[in-house]
Amino acid sequence: MMIIALGNTKGGVGKSTLTTNLAVSFQQRGKQVIVVEADPTVRTLSTWKQDRTDAGRSPITVMRQAGNLRDDLRDLDSKYDIVLVDLPGKDSREMRTTSTVADLLVIPCQPHQIDIDPTVEMIPLLEEARDYNPDLIVAVVLNRASTHAWSTEEKDARAALGESFEHILPTAIHERNAFSASTGRGLSALESSDKKAQHEIKSFTDDIERLITNG
């Protein structure tokens, strides 16, 4: 049983899209999954859940919860294989309390300086979380990377982030229409026809499972 949170103190990095894709990916691997929509200001995941139901796809439980999530997440962790938490895009009570019980915090970061700087600035917050949860694993995933063959942004971002973070996931998620299009229909990229997007989500999930297993 595992609590996996996705969060960044900067908004707009693609947390919700990655959360929905991981939810379907883990479900397809036979896991019992619940998604916690922890941002009280949006209903992205609740809408996705309803769209998914309307599309006749295998249902995934989404619950909205805000404030101190510590006890709620512990309770859910005893009932589900995977608890995915989509955190607000800011330093918040939800992020801080979740970090005290999560097994893994995945930090999506777009490979641009405007995203890299605030991601690195999270380090003091993460160090504080480890005072309460020393086993917390933190990993950065590069999201919405360029698909241009000659782009060096992914390589440059890995180098910059690697100075502050121990774990930068090997798989980068690239800017592909399949992600936004599928999310808008209650689906995941795994349920689209885009083979590259499918491969990236499967590989992303593999990275997470490997990291959790190896610590």
Image (cartoon, rainbow, N blue to C red):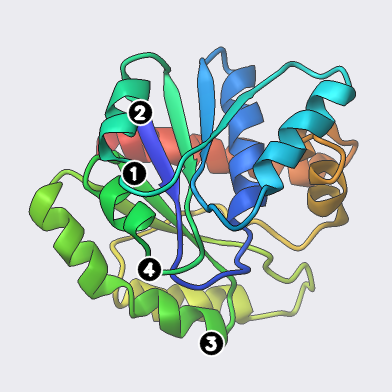
Q: Which residue is mark 1?
A: 104
Residue 173, percent from left and from top: 65, 56
Of labels 4 and 3, earlier in sequence is 4
- Residue at 43% of width from left, 46% of height from top? 66
Q: CA distance from mark 1 to mark 3?
A: 24 Å
* Residue 122 shows in this picture: yes
Q: Nearer the viewer, residue 174 or 45?
A: 45
Of labels 4 and 1, earlier in sequence is 4
Q: Which residue is mark 2?
A: 2
| Quadrant of residue 23 within the rendered picture | top right
Nearest-to-viewer mark from 4 and 1: 4
Label annotation for residue 46? none
Of labels 1 and 2, earlier in sequence is 2
| Quadrant of residue 114 within the rendered picture | bottom right
Q: CA distance from mark 4 to mark 3?
A: 19 Å
Q: Which residue is mark 3?
A: 113
Local SS, label 2: strand
* Residue 76, placed above or below residue 198: above
Q: Which residue is mark 4?
A: 91
Q: Mark 3 belongs to which amino acid?
A: Gln
* Residue 213 shows in this picture: no
Q: Mark 2 belongs to which amino acid?
A: Met
